[in-house]
Amino acid sequence: MTAAPRIIAVEAIPLAVTGQRDFRISEGGTRTHVSVILRIRTEDNGLEGIGEVVSGPPGKPEEFLEEIVGAVHRYVAPALMGLVATERTAAMRRVERVLKGRIWTKAALNNALWDLHGKALGVPVTDLLGGRTGDRVPVIGPVIGVKAPDEMAQEAVAHVAAGFRTLKLKVGETPERDLDRVRVVREAVGPDIALRVDANDHYRPAEAIRFIRAIERYEPEHVEQPLPRHDILGMAEVRRQVGVPLMTDDTVATPRDAMTVARLGAADRVKVKVTKHGLDGARLIVGMLEAAGIACVLGHVFEMGLAAAAEAQLAVTADNLCPPHEIGSMQPMGITADIITADLQPRNGEIGLPVGPGLGVSLAWDRIEEYRARDVPR
């Protein structure tokens, strides 16, 4: 390896993986997961940084395959040419100058730069983040999509039998129907299993208050994003009117958004996604909200193993997080294969932290070729 390997190329590889069953949230449904793999290549053959752009949420992506691939090839790649592999800060500044918005693309790029930095120095990303506090990462069970209450209860019982102690339920129909979903699942799993409820922007304030008050007796750990993402004042009003902690996810796209939530008292918790904020942005948000007395929940429920590995780095190095973490699983769509050679499938409610330089994972190129999305414009 040269003393200062420089970046010579940035590639974007679009993927589409179709499962055996549909997954539905209030915003839409799908059985196909879509991601773009980023490769930051250097003049030293074999030294590259990798990251995963998650095109989410299911059924209603915020960034599409075509625009992710186009942005990387037209703007990101030229901006990074010639930079040294360890110049993360300079790289992100260049990208910010040429690419507005596109938070998911920039988050994956940030994670790939951390991976490249660690590999260039021969150390894990956790070392660059200050050192890890453990080797195992507690995770929730595979998220339970919007279905008939009895079907959701059956899934919940199966997840508990597999060793998960915290479950996440998607809702987003009517307050009465969603109350039935929470009630039936609680009755099926008993009082000792934590339940997280996610409405995905579905309700208006009055409906949200009515729904949340109705499910208080079933003691959910929190209710996530009951209102549309833009209604921060509405979230603050709902929070004043209910006895269940509120969490926001979609409202917080940037650290600036997190500061606004804190100032307005709009949430008790904030969802932090390394896939949406990058390791730099996620660390900043977690620290900022710790100072404001607001706890963070980590994770993104749909991602392949590469993005999950990036989430895991933060899980074992950051304070102010509320485990278990919502690190991705494709099981709700019936997808078990992955694009990395390491095994990050949860066992007894935990995944193992990948070991090795950078993010600690390698790509399984045969599977990437199998899942590659063809005919995506550049």
Image: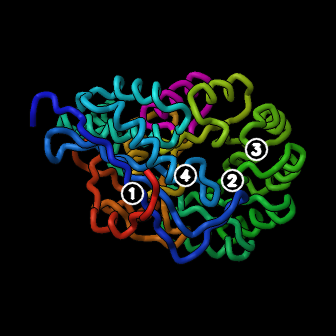
Say which of 132 and 82 sits in front.
82
The circle on residue 198 is 2
Q: Which residue is tagged 4?
A: 64
Q: Which is more N-terminal, label 3 or label 2?
A: 2
Amino acid type of disc 3? Pro
Instruction: Indicate whether residue 285 is drawn in magenta.
Output: yes
Q: Which residues are magenta?
A: 277-296
Q: Residue 360 at x, y = what percent?
A: 27, 48
Please, what is the three-letter code of the amino acid marked with disc 1?
A: Gly
Distance of label 2 from label 4 (alpha carbons) = 23 Å
Name which quarter of the figure residue 316 lies in: top left
Q: Is residue 336 visible?
A: yes
Which comes before the other along the chain, label 1 or label 4? Answer: 4
Q: Which residue is mark 1?
A: 305
CB atoms at circles 2 and 1 under 8 Å apart?
A: no
Question: Residue 25: horizontal and vertical position, in percent?
Answer: 68, 61
